[in-house]
Image (tube, rainbow, N blue to C red):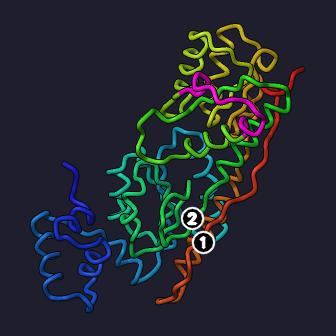
Amino acid sequence: MADPTMHDVATLAGVSIKTVSNVINDYVHISAETRARVLAAIKELDYHPNLSARGLRSGKTGVIGLALPELRQNYFAELADAVIRAAELKNRGVVVQQTGGSARREAEVLSRSRVQLIDGLLFSPAGIGEDDAALLDVDYPLVLLGEHIFGSTADHVTMHNVSAARAAVEHLLEIGRRRIAVIGVNPPGEQVIRSADFRLDGYRAALESAGIPIDPALERVAVPWHRESGADAARGMLEDGVEVDAVFALNDSLALGVLRALGESGRRVPDDIAVIGFDNIDEARFSVPSLSSVEPGRDAIASTAVDYLIERIDAKPGTVTPPRLFKPEFRVVARESTRAS
């Protein structure tokens, strides 16, 4: 059984996570009745609070946390590398945590970071959704990464998912493609809003602007966003006999899987089917053919997120500043997979 979290204590006591934190840290402006309920819940659950929050107030460690869904995805691995390099320029170390995109594990990271003695946290949610926004009400410096779906008081650093996806599809339209598939769509009924939903919006907007009807047969589910998923989705589309002359994969890992499946089937890229991905991971330059992709501004995301977090860490106690939202510029990087020889 997983260790109890601050969220569990708050639920049992019928209070907010912030209130639990205030009780743990002996804030004076807590009613006796509320304090008693929280302490009773702590005792019943045998909850042991993390020492990091107290460390934040007693002295800085020079270490920040970075919580990501999975390092298996090249984008997150390269983002972690960029964060570490940006933090080193500020004389900060980085401790990386992998949540697996699990809502439970993300809640644990937020309510009682598994890493002790960090000054603040860069957090990329994948499992929690809008209904879990209260989890982001934490008492330490926090910067969110990923799509801006939470009405949080934390700073948020993200990317232009809709307009960048639209630009990718417009690139395919510009080279004369009209039967453009999208691979990486969420399964029907998915409750949590994810980047896939915004990139799908960009895909549809580009087609509609070009006067091309939306064809559900061209919108293919592929989860998780790994190479195998992209290959399987492309194989299924070809086996279904769907007419297609281009593929927009919602990330580069999916696109690399698509390239594999197309090669196995004897389709030539880009002569028969052009392919473009998203994220511009390093591997895109070395695939055969090299993969066209959207560069979303990963380095700017990393450096800005680190800057925002350190500014919050170094701010004077009691300083209140409104949350900031940053989206870097993006660009389409055209390579061999969309350029006929």
Circle 2 packing at 10 Å, graded few (<14), some (14-19), many (20+), is many
Q: Secondary structure at mark 1?
A: loop
Q: Nearer the viewer, residue 124 or 325?
A: 325
Q: Which residue position holds label 1?
A: 324
Looking at the picture, how far across and down is residue 47, in whole percent? 18, 65
Residue at image location 47% in from the left, 72% down from the top: 119
* Residue 265 horizontal/vertical position (percent): 66, 8
Residue beneath the point at 76% across and 13% down: 268
Residue type at mark 2: give it.
His
Q: How many numbered tags mark residues here?
A: 2
Q: Is residue 177 left or right of residue 195?
A: right
The answer to if 215 sits in the magenta stretch is: yes
Q: Amino acid at mark 1?
A: Arg
At 41% from the left and 37% from the top, the residue drawn is 189
Identify the residue at horizontal 50%, vertical 70% (top origin).
154
Classify residue 93 as left or right of residue 249.
left
As displayed, is residue 38 above or below residue 31?
above
Q: Quadrant of the C terminus?
A: top right
Q: Are marks 1 and 2 in contact (CB under 8 Å)?
A: yes
Where in the figure is residue 303, as x and y percent of width and height?
A: 66, 63
Q: Quadrant of residue 24?
A: bottom left
Q: Which residues are magenta?
A: 206-220
What mark, if any, has residue 156 been given in the picture? 2
Residue 299 percent location from the top left of the image: 69, 55
